[in-house]
Amino acid sequence: MAISSYGKAKPLLRAMRGETLARPPWWLMRQAGRYLPEYRAIRAKAADFITLCLTPELAAEVTLQPVRRFNMDAAILFSDILLVPRALGQRLSFEHDGPKLAPIVSAGELSPLDLGMLEPVGAAIRRVRPALPDDVTLIGFAGAPWTVATYMAEGGTSRDFVRAKAWAYRDPHGFGALIDVISDATLAFLTLQIEAGVEAVQLFDSWAGALSPEGFERWVVRPTASIVSTLKTRFPHVPVVGFPRGAGFCYERYATVTGVDAISIDTAVPSADARDRLQGKLTVQGNLDPVLLLAGGAALKRGVRELRATLGGGPYVFNLGHGILPETPPEHVAELAQILAEPLH
Ligand code: CP3
């Protein structure tokens, strides 16, 4: 693995560029959110979740909250993957049971991307960057095309993805047109974020595990590789993290082919396999069970130490296997920070 020449770079960026650090840098997916009382207070002030995402002062404040409390190595921009379908003209709201969109059956129903609708995200980034400590990285993100397409076709969260998958099977050309539209919009959104000041980006493919291996190749690997390749020509120094959640045996294919700098592994991936089969190619991020963080105590301590022992000998970023659960006691995150600060024996 190449030794980075960025001696003074931030720890998270060093790890994402392939360095092995004595203490792994860490952050948590969904680290800004409902488990924090200070988030709930701000959330109560905003008219709704979308307004919160698109009000730069509030989005910036919520982005900074977890870092202030726990001193993570990264802040992740407070935003949402579904702002992209909204900027393509699809109606979006967040109800108590999750996001709701007016489902589409053809990419022809969409409007050209209205980048202006995403500009407040850039404004939030410009507020966050100068407020962060020198060694803390700002991460931007977007949904990967397949995962965003599922929400657009299903109209919300789904259990089996029948509409999206049946569309892809029956009409691969038409579904491919949707994937292309989302890919272009995703590139524009990530470009806006990087130009505003994010230093690394993560592509969330939360529903990658719903596809067959052929579908995974066509709707996850291919569009991701294309997005990464364009990002790399535009911004060669910005690390890209891929998170094909639930990909199982296909993780290796994704790691080999897409060109991402780091791969985020979900809770079900055995960490020793990630070490043996992925870490020689790229940086591994993950994969503590979010429920273990919720549970806390001796089990949490053991789980964190085991992960460090297995993955800490190579390029590694400590994270969860999926987002932090809203019921997680904030004190457990403080405990986690302490465990991660210990030297490893
Ligand atoms: O990680 C962070 O702290 C940054 C913020 C962030 C949010 N969403 C804020 C949010 C990130 C990185 C996301 C990504 C996201 N959004 C994904 C991919 C990651 C994953 O969890 O698989 C997905 C699938 C979405 C779409 C989405 N947004 C859903 C399904 C929901 C409802 C479920 C839920 O957790 O409530 C949201 C709402 C949402 N996005 C909330 C937050 C903090 C909760 C809304 C609220 O506060 O009322």
Image: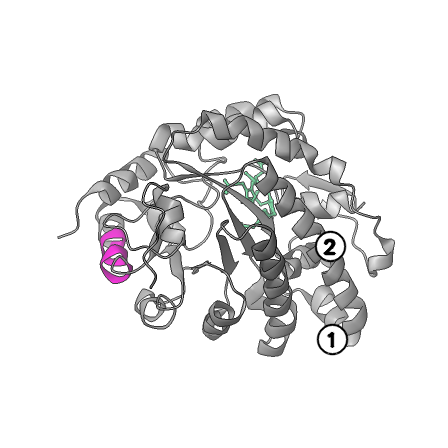
Q: In the rendered image of this protein, does residue 239 appear above or below residue 215?
A: above
Q: Is 11 above or below relative to 171?
A: above
Q: CA distance from mark 1 to mark 2?
A: 16 Å
- Looking at the image, can residue 127 be seen? yes
Residue in front for this viewpoint, 19 or 39: 19
Rendered-image quarter of ligand 1: top right
Residue 294 seen in render: no
Q: Where is the N terminus found, in terms of image quarters?
A: bottom left
Q: Position of residue 134 (x, y in %)?
A: 38, 31
Residue at horizontal 39%, vertical 27%? 68
Please give left or right for residue 164 compared with residue 216 in the image. Answer: right
**Furthest residue toward right:** 108
Residue type at mark 2?
A: Met
Q: Is residue 77 magenta?
A: no
Q: Work out whether mark 1 precedes mark 2 in sequence or the reverse, and give the earlier one.
A: 2
The residue under label 1 is 169
Could you say where residue 11 lies in the image, as x and y percent from the top left?
Answer: 34, 44
Residue at image coords 59%, 30%: 124
Extreme residue toward the left, this view? 345
Q: Which residue is mark 2?
A: 152
Identify the mark at residue 52; answer none if there is no mark.
none
The verdict on residue 310 being magenta is yes
Q: For residue 119, which quarter of the picture? A: top right
